[in-house]
Every structure is written in C-alpha cells, then in structure tokens.
Image (cartoon, grey):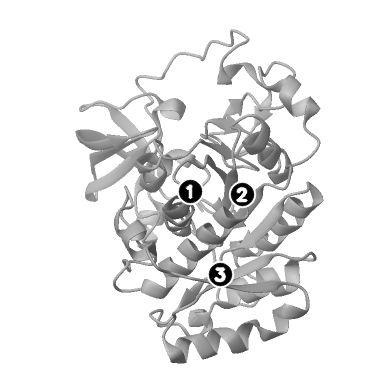
C-alpha cells in the first residue's frame, strides 16, 4: 500500500517534458523525488510536499523515486475548460485513484480530431511494430529510419508500465523524431489521448498521419516470474487489434544472450507467450541475420512452434549498429547498454527495418 512522507523541497535537480526531479528533505533524510507539474503544480525550493515513497523503499530500479502527490500549501488553480484544450474532455485516466486526470480524448465530440476519427475505418495496411519493453522503442525507431529517414513514426504507449508518459526520459529525447505519442488505456500525458489500443492506432494513422506505428508499454514492465504474470502479454492483444483494423503487425522479439535469467535468454518467454499463445492472427517476426551461431540456434528452435501461425523473417543487419549508435537517446534495457546486450537492440532495430520494407516506395 502507500507509504507516506512529508518533506520540504531543497532543490530542483533537473526537468524534462512533463516532469521535474527534486531533492526533498524528509524525516528519514534527503530523497530524490519526481513531480508531474500538470497534476500537482510546479514545485519550488521551500515548498512542502506530500510524497509516496513506496517504490523508493522497495528499491525499484525503474520507479526508484519518491513521487510528489501534492503541494498542500500551494495548490494549483483549477484548469480552464475552454472547449479547445486537453482540459475540455471527459476521458478519465488512472480512474478512481487520487490523482485521476480528466482529459480530452482524441475521438470525443469536443475534440478537433473527431471528424477524422469518425471517418477512420482502418489502418490502410500501415505496418505496426509491437514490442514488450519500452526500451525497444528507440531501437525500433532507429531501424525504421536507417532505411526510411523520411518515414513518420508514431508511438502508442499502453498502460502496462508507467501511466504518465512524462515519466519517460527516452520519450522526451525522441520528441523531435516521432510524429507524436498516443497514450491509451489508463496511460496519459501523450500528444493525444485514447481509451483503447484500437482508437489509438486509428489516431496514429489518421490524426498523426503515421507511416509506421510502434506499440509498447511505458517504462517499468511488471512481471512476477510466472508464465502469465507479466504486463507484456498485452503485446499479443495488440497484434490482434492491428489485424482487426487492417494493419500489418510486425512483432519485435525480445532476444538476449546477456540476460542472467534463463527465462529471458534466447527468445524471452514474454515473446513466446505473447506471440505464441495470445496473438490469434499472423504477424511477421523479424530475426537479425547475423546472430552468434549458438544464439541463432536457440532462437530458431524457440520460434519453430510459432511458425504454424507467424512468418519468421530474416533481416540483414548491415548499417543497424551505426543507426543504433546514432540514437538521440541512451539505449538501455535492464541496466544494459548496446555493447552489453547487443542482440536485444539489434533484434528491435531489425523489426523496425522490416517495417520500413513494407512501406510503399
């Protein structure tokens, strides 16, 4: 449950789109805290803040912040609903939690995009890359732009990890290279808000005019180490949504020979479950062409049962290392960078490259 603390902001450490990192003095000593100004107002040194320190106490790697719940002595003014802003909607996210925001959905009647969404009937064969982890996002994007630097790429952020898009420094660093972000389900804070993955995909295509869309959860994958207890099962459901709307699903595989956990070595059980048991329709599953021999055999053997439904595609990797190294954001998954988990990032980039080949010349 919630572990509460009260503290005083001693300094503002840094900020990025939608988030401010603070140092806060508490009775337990100084802590690193994160505030979302659109929810709480902008903290300043000297402000008293109420904190949720649960993730910090647990030592979570991704969520290792105290989170600012409120500035009780300096509450922000009520947002103005003028019929044109994100505050004019009726879409409630993080529903029935103390910090539920009420936002303008991309397909609501008050939305300027309502006509486009009403007219949208499908994805027009748009390639959609689905991925388990948020860390795959920049690598997939690098793979798309390695061959098609002109391609408009949108990101649909699902609610399996962080709910506020503002939490992601990766997303902040990719803002200039993405056509936009659609937050869906309970997630919020994107350029557009949608209630379902289906609506988010349609918005990516018909409002953001994406050529390719990437679907992945925000930072902070939830997993219990059991066969079904992980948030990445939603990847298979996303594949089903893509096909239902007339898109072309491309499954980014979670491949690694660096992960110390047996269930994630070779092809992770997350990918095998999502694509092998949850996805009910075919997808392309790209595999890098030049994996180390032992890893390549592991991957081939693991994917063999999936070939009755899906198409495994071997993708050349020439130029992908350079594209990954040129990423505008740091590549990191579970604390490992490109050199430490090369296969993981190249596999994600290969999915992006394959999606680019599906675009009309």
Q: Residues within 10 Å of mark 3 (few under 14, many from 20)?
A: many
Residue drawn at (55%, 84%), measured in percent from left and top? 299
- Mark 3 lies on a secondary structure that is loop
Proximity of marks 2 and 3: CB atoms separated by less than 8 Å: no
The answer to which of 8 and 295 lies nearer the viewer is 295
Distance from disc 2 to disc 3, alpha carbons, whole Å, reads 21 Å
* Above-or-below relation of 227 to 245: below
Residue 73 visible in the picture: yes
Of the two numbered discs 2 and 3 in the rendering, the one whose residue sits closer to the viewer: 2
Above or below — where is 212 with respect to 319? above
Q: Residue 133 location, x and y as percent?
A: 50, 60
- Measure the C-alpha gap from mark 3 to mark 1: 21 Å
Q: Residue furthest top?
A: 82
User: What residue does disc 1 label?
Assistant: 148
60 sits to left or right of 45: right
Q: Are marks 1 and 2 in contact (CB under 8 Å)?
A: yes
Who's the residue at 44% across and 79% down the image? 290
Residue indicated by mark 2: 359
Residue toward you, 15 or 50: 15
Q: Give the mark, 1 or 2, whose residue is nearer the N terminus.
A: 1
User: What is the distance, in whole Å, between disc 1 and disc 2 at their CAs?
Assistant: 9 Å
Q: Earlier in the sequence, mark 2 or mark 3?
A: 3
Task: Find residue 14 and report its horizontal and vertical position in percent.
Answer: 23, 37
Q: Is residue 158 visible?
A: no
120 or 314: nearer the viewer: 314
What residue appears at the point 63 percent right and 47 percent down from the top-left corner? 360
Mark 2, residues whose alpha carbon is within 10 Å: few (<14), some, or many (≥20)?
some
Q: Secondary structure at mark 2?
A: loop
| Rendering quarter of residue 100 | top right
Q: Which residue is mark 3?
A: 253
């Amino acid at each position: 449950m919630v572990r509460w603390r009260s503290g005083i902001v001693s300094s503002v450490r840094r900020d990025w789109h939608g988030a401010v990192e603070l140092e806060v003095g508490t009775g337990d000593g100084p802590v690193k805290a994160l505030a979302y100004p659109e929810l709480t107002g902008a903290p300043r040194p000297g402000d008293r803040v109420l904190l949720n320190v649960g993730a910090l106490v647990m030592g979570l790697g991704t969520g290792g912040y105290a989170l600012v719940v409120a500035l009780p002595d300096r509450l922000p003014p009520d947002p103005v609903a003028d019929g044109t802003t994100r505050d004019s909607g009726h879409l409630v996210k993080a529903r029935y939690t103390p910090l539920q925001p009420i936002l303008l959905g991309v397909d609501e009647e008050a939305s300027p995009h309502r006509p486009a969404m009403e007219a949208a009937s499908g994805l027009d064969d748009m390639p959609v890359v689905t991925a388990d982890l948020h860390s795959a996002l920049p690598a997939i994007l690098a793979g798309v732009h390695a061959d098609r630097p002109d391609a408009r790429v949108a990101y649909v952020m699902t609610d399996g990890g962080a709910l506020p898009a503002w939490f992601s420094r990766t997303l902040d660093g990719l803002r200039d290279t993405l056509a936009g972000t659609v937050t869906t389900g309970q997630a919020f804070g994107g350029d557009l808000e949608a209630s379902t993955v289906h609506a988010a995909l349609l918005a990516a295509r018909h409002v953001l005019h994406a050529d390719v869309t990437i679907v992945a959860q925000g930072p902070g994958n939830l997993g219990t180490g059991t066969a079904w207890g992980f948030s990445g099962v939603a990847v298979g459901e996303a594949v089903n949504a893509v096909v239902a709307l007339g898109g072309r699903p491309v499954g980014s595989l979670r491949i690694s020979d660096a992960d110390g956990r047996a269930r994630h070595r070779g092809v992770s059980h997350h990918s095998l479950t999502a694509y092998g048991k949850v996805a009910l329709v075919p997808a392309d599953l790209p595999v890098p062409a030049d994996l180390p021999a032992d890893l390549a055999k592991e991957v081939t053997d693991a994917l063999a049962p999936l070939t009755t439904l899906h198409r495994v595609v071997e993708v050349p990797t020439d130029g992908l290392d350079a594209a990954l190294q040129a990423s505008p954001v740091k590549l990191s998954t579970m604390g490992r960078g490109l050199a430490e988990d090369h296969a993981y990032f190249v596999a994600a980039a290969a999915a992006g490259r394959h999606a680019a080949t599906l675009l009309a010349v």
